[in-house]
Image (tube, helix red, strand yellow):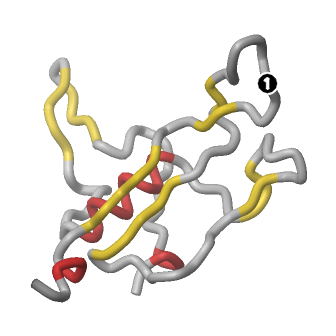
Amino acid sequence: QRDMLKDTIVVFGSEFGRTPMAQGNGRDHHLAGFTMWFAGGGFKPGISYGATDELGYHAVEDRVSVHDVHATLLHLLGIDHARFTYKFQGLDSKLTGVEQANVLSNLLT
């Protein structure tokens, strides 16, 4: 069946990357620079967004938080991330956390 990506969002990624330098038998968790890949469901095809420094250690251009990713995915699902809450320990909590989260409109068609 053709055109299934119009209604399907594919996400490949993690909330952290790996350090650009070797550490013993491998590399450590790294929160300051990581990669995610998106396809379909309203994402612009064939673009690259953001950049790290020359060592790949820190994001330096068009920085994106995991909360921004969550806000964008919720937006594509038709959910307003700023209004959508759930009860947790008696408090209304947001899936995008307490910090400012932004829909990444530059990535959307």
Q: At 60% across and 37% down in the image, what residue appears?
A: 17
Q: At 89% across and 53% down in the image, what residue appears?
A: 54
Q: Nearer the viewer, residue 74 or 56?
A: 56
> In which image quadrant can residue 41 be found?
bottom left
Whole-percent x, y for residue 42 in the image: 32, 79
Whole-percent x, y for residue 30 in the image: 66, 31
- The amino acid marked with disc number 1 is Ala
43 with respect to 21 (left or right)? left
Q: At 70% across and 13% down in the image, what residue appears?
A: 25
Provide the residue designation for mark 1: 22
Look at the picture and state if 65 lies above or below 40: above
Whole-percent x, y for residue 59 in the image: 74, 51
Whole-percent x, y for residue 61 in the image: 75, 62
Circle 1 — which element?
loop
Look at the picture and state if 104 lies above or below 6: above
59 with respect to 40 (left or right)? right
